[in-house]
Structure formats: structure tokens, C-alpha cells
Amino acid sequence: MMEEKEISQAVIGRLPRYLRYLGELKDEGMERVSSQELSERMKVTASQIRQDLNNFGGFGQQGYGYNVEYLYREISRILGLDRTHRFIIIGAGNLGQALGGYLNFERRGFLFSGIFDKNPELTGKEVRGIRVQPMEEMEQFIRDNDVDIAVLAIPKNSAVEVAEHLVQNGIKAIWNFAHVDLNVPEGIQVENVHLSDSLMKLSYNINRYLQENRESAEL
Ligand code: NAI
């Protein structure tokens, strides 16, 4: 297997989208695809696709295109999806319960294995067959269940402290939905998700569209 060079985060950020499209091609029974065809589907340039996939030594062959199955498997492997990750959710409110209830993470190898909340009224409530546990149980649970990812679905005022606690107990990666920057030691991976960032981008694009149309109407 080829050694991978350091891949930019921008490219990594695009890989899940490649994977989704390749998954569709696979489901349609397509065995190979040219960068041109992929480009038309994905609405990105063929040269961008070639450049992105060249990061991995390129899976394509001149005149043949890409082998869909192979590319799908390789991108999955690069994204670490060829193994399972167990995750726990901290915060069993609206967001925590919605994330726990979402079935499709499993398809990618992310196993929802526990959910914790400090509110005793939530203890025992079931989220997709898994009971909410009090925070005091968390430490032991992480130790016993080989958990590697924690999802933070709690308000920002306690997120930093809870993240520290998680790391002390062996969590290696945090999927952070709390609106605060976490201060974690080197080697701990954090991925921040702020849905409102995406909404703001949408809002910007609405404005831009309106503005452009107004301008062209005035011409
Ligand atoms: P919620 O109020 O329904 O749930 C929060 C839960 O966290 C409650 O059950 C509460 O008891 C628990 N909690 C609070 N402090 C805790 C602690 N120290 N340890 C354990 N559990 C604790 O709120 P919701 O709607 O579920 O949102 C959760 C947080 O996620 C909010 O702070 C919100 O701002 C944020 N959020 C972020 C989004 C994003 O895109 N990043 C989207 C939606 C919410």
C-alpha cells in the first residue's frame, strides 16, 4: 500500500463528498468513472478532481478513468472508515437525543454506545435503546467500552471543563457542538460543528443573489 503524504485539510474536507458520489455510482452498478463524468455529477472541475485524487498517488489510469469500487474503498480507508469508532454523547437534550437517534452514523462505522447528562430527571430515559446515564458513570463507562469519540452537546459554560474530564479519561477525539473553543492537549482531535456557520453562509448567498439581481435589473 502506498505511503500517504500529508494531505491538506481542505482536501480531507472534500473526501466525504467524493465518497457519497462514489457510493451512488456503486449502487448504480457503475464500475468505472472518468474525472469528466464525476465532474459533471459533482459540479466541480475535472482538474480539481484529478488534483484531489492525485494526493493519494492517483487512482486513475489514462483513458480508463477511476475504478469506482477501488476508489470508494481507498477513500473510506483514508478517512479511517474501515474500522469502527465507538462514541458517547454528553448532553441528552434536544441535540444529544437527535444525534443519538440518527441511524446512519452506524453505516459509516460510528457506533453510538452511551449517553450522559447531569440532569437526574433524564437518567434512565432511552435514546434508541440506550439509557441516559448520570455523569458519575462516565469514567467507568469509557474505560469498559473502548470509546474513542465524545460528542459534546452541552452548553458552552461547562464544555471546556467537561472536555478536560473526557480527555483525562482517555477520550482521543471530540466532536464539539458547544459554541466554545476547547483547550485540549496536543494529540487530541477536535472537530467543531456550528450549524449556524452554514446558515450564515446561506444568508450571505441570499443577499448576494438579491443584490446581483437588483443590479442586473437596473442595467
Ligand atoms: P438542551 O438544553 O436541550 O440540552 C442540553 C443538555 O445538556 C441538558 O439536558 C443539560 O442537562 C445537559 N448538560 C448541561 N451541562 C451539562 C454538563 N456539564 N454535563 C452533562 N450534561 C450537561 O440544549 P440543546 O438544544 O440540546 O443544545 C445543546 C447545546 O448545543 C447548546 O448549548 C446549544 O447552544 C448547542 N447547539 C449547537 C449547535 C451547533 O450547530 N453547534 C446546534 C444546536 C445546539
Image: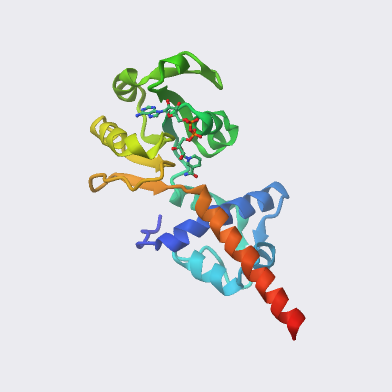
Residue 170 is left or right of residue 206, and the answer is left
For ligand 1, the image quadrant comes to: top left
> Percent from the top left, x then y, of residue 128?
56, 22
Q: On the picture, is 177 further left or further right than 20?
A: left
Q: How is the image coloured?
A: rainbow
From the viewer's perspective, tell me whether residue 197 is left or right of residue 2. Answer: right
Name the residue located 50 percent from the left edge and 54 percent from the top edge. 197
- Return the residue found at the far bottom: 219
On screen, residue 111 versus residue 69, left or right, reads left
| Residue located 48% across and 68% down the image | 54
Q: In this view of the protein, which residue sits in the foreground, 54 or 16? A: 16
Q: Position of residue 92 (x, y in %)?
A: 47, 26
Residue for point 45% across, 15% down:
121
Q: Vertically, is 175 above or below 86? A: below
Residue in the foreground of this view, choosing between 186 and 23: 186
Q: 136 above or below 217?
A: above
Q: How many marks?
A: 0
Name the residue: 60% across, 58% down. Answer: 67
